[in-house]
C-alpha cells in the first residue's frame, strides 16, 4: 500500500490521565463528522488519510483539523459546511481561508 499524499488530523481533545478539555471532542460526537470527512474524501477521489489525535492545544478555537504535510490548521470545524469548504479547498489547492487558524 502506497503512502497517502496528505494526512488530515482531527483533534479529539484526549489528554493522558485527564478528561477531554475544550470542544474538539464534542465537535465530532453525534454529528458523524469523521464519517462525513471520509465520505467527502472518497467522493472527491482525494489521496488522503484521516486520523484522530490527542489534544492539539488550541481549545478555544476548536474543533481543530490539520492537513499535513502542508501544515494547514483549521478552526471551528464543527459542521458539514466547514468540512465541505476545507475539502473543496484541498481539491482546488486554495485553502478555505475563513477556517484557517492564523
Image (spheres, helix red, strand yellow):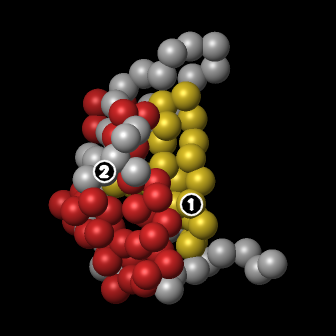
Residue 68 in the image: above or below residue 46: above
Q: Which residue lies furthest to the top in this view?
A: 18
Q: Is residue 75 visible?
A: no
Dot 2: element: loop
Distance CA(mark 1)–CA(mark 2): 14 Å
Quadrant for residue 30, please give it.
top left
- Which quadrant would the N terminus be assigned to in this image? bottom right
Residue under the image location 49 percent in, 37 percent down: 12
Relative to residue 83, is residue 32 drawn left or right? right
Labelled disc at residue 63:
none
Q: Position of residue 11 (x, y in %)?
A: 48, 42
Dot 1: element: strand
Residue 24 in the image: above or below residue 6: above
Q: Position of residue 97 (x, y in %)?
A: 22, 65
Q: Where is residue 102 in the image (x, y as percent from the top left)?
A: 29, 51
Labelled disc at residue 50:
1
Q: Can residue 98 be seen in this view?
A: yes
Labelled disc at residue 77:
2
Residue under the image location 41 percent in, 72 percent down: 40
Looking at marks 1 and 2 on the same chain, the residue that comes earlier in the sequence is marked by: 1
Instruction: Please tell me how crowded label 2 is: few (under 14), some (14-19), or many (20+) other residues with Cα within 10 Å.
Output: many
Q: Position of residue 44 (x, y in %)?
A: 43, 84
Quadrant for residue 100, please give it.
bottom left
Quadrant for residue 53, please give it.
top right
Relative to residue 10, is residue 100 drawn left or right? left
* Marks 1 and 2 close (CB-CB < 8 Å): no
Compare residues 89 and 44 and report the one nearer the observer: 44
Residue under the image location 42 percent in, 21 percent down: 21
Q: Residue furthest right?
A: 1
Residue under the image location 56 percent in, 47 percent down: 52
Instruction: Please tell me how crowded label 1 is: few (under 14), some (14-19), or many (20+) other residues with Cα within 10 Å.
Output: some
Amino acid at each position: 500500500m502506497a503512502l497517502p499524499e496528505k494526512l488530515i488530523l482531527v483533534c479529539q481533545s484526549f489528554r493522558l490521565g485527564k478528561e477531554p478539555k475544550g470542544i474538539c471532542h464534542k465537535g465530532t460526537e453525534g454529528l458523524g463528522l469523521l464519517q462525513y470527512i471520509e465520505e467527502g474524501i472518497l467522493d472527491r477521489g482525494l489521496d488522503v488519510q484521516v486520523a484522530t489525535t490527542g489534544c492539539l492545544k488550541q481549545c478555544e478555537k476548536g474543533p481543530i483539523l490539520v492537513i499535513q504535510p502542508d501544515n494547514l490548521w483549521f478552526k471551528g470545524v464543527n459542521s458539514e459546511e466547514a468540512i465541505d469548504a476545507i475539502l473543496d479547498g484541498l481539491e482546488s489547492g486554495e485553502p478555505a481561508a475563513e477556517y484557517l487558524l492564523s
